[in-house]
Amino acid sequence: MKQMVILSGKGGTGKTTVAAGLAHLASAERRLMLADADVDAANLELVLSPNLLETHEFVSGELAAIDATACIGCGRCAEACRFGAVLPDPGQGSENGHLYRIDAGACEGCAACYYVCPEAAIVLSDRHSGRWFASETRFGPLLHAHLFAGQENSGKLVTLLRQETLARGTEGKADLAIVDGPPGIGCPVIAAVSGIDLALLVTEPSVAGIHDLERILQVTQHFRVPAAVVVNKADLNAARTQEVERYCVAQDIPLLGRLPYDPAVITLMTQGRPITEEEGPVAAGIRAVWTRLAAHLFAS
């Protein structure tokens, strides 16, 4: 099974628009496995209108809590904590002073308080940081996730999705996995790009767009992942589009397409439909991109 991830150096460039369109077109020729790796703000399911089949808890790390009946208020836990998560609880008292409580939002689960407590009053429990889902779309199975507000380890959740995508895609004899990747260049992107056959980089003709294209390309090059580029809203700034083209030539990166600005994209996306389900300039551009991608991915 080939694996392709769609990335951009920032959000709002049109990753999901392109991903949904490619899923629609590719499903007519290939058996697909789909994944939305933007776990902080997943929205591919909003376009593909899936039927939810499975819900799973995402557990990441541990969370400390203090058993008030065992705490003697010695304060060793507060001294050991380097994250300011152990606080006096003025509502409680003990012979030696105030009891303590854990600020769950500040706790990093390092367990330092657990090991220094002389009364074994610290309890560690699994930290439920989000959920991940398995759904069915008209284009193929979709894996997606939701990281709870304020939680970390989004890279770990993306890795879990990637592993499930590979396992389920292999089991279902899929030809291609299309992953709608997270924005930026941080840990979630690294988790999304590792082991991928091709990264499709979506950019836009602006100063920020070109800068972020350079950043995300550095990531793919570092991990030795082949990359190709699509310029979205290419007609809004011809000079900047030409700058992107020159940059791609200089970096020896294939430029697979230039998509024009079209308000119809917003209309169809809000209806839960890929732009390729209607004829138009953007749909035609994505079809051309898919033709070139398929030739590249399945050349041998």
Image (tube, rainbow, N blue to C red):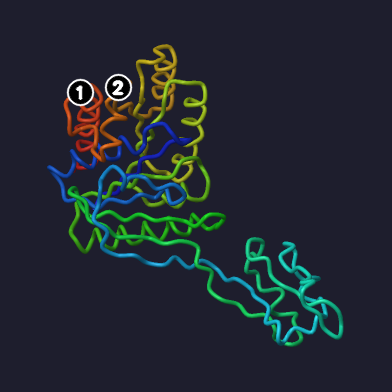
Q: Residue at x 74, y 87 (%)?
A: 119
- Relative placement, left or right, of 228 versus 291 is right
Distance between mark 1 and mark 2 Cα atoms: 8 Å
Tell me residue 14's x, y (percent): 37, 33
Q: Which label is found at residue 262?
A: 2
Kind of residue indicated by mark 1: Gly
Tell me residue 225's x, y (percent): 39, 43
In the image, is residue 30 above or below residue 228? below
Looking at the rendered structure, the secondary structure element under dot 1 is loop
Looking at the rendered structure, the secondary structure element under dot 2 is loop
- Relative placement, left or right, of 221 versus 152 is left
Q: Residue at x 74, y 69 (%)?
A: 86
The crowding category of the residue bearing disc 1, from other C-alpha atoms within 10 Å (few below 14, some 14 to 19, many at least 20), is some
Q: Which residue is denoted by mark 1 in the rendering?
A: 280
Kind of residue indicated by mark 2: Asp
- Relative placement, left or right, of 80 versus 296 is right
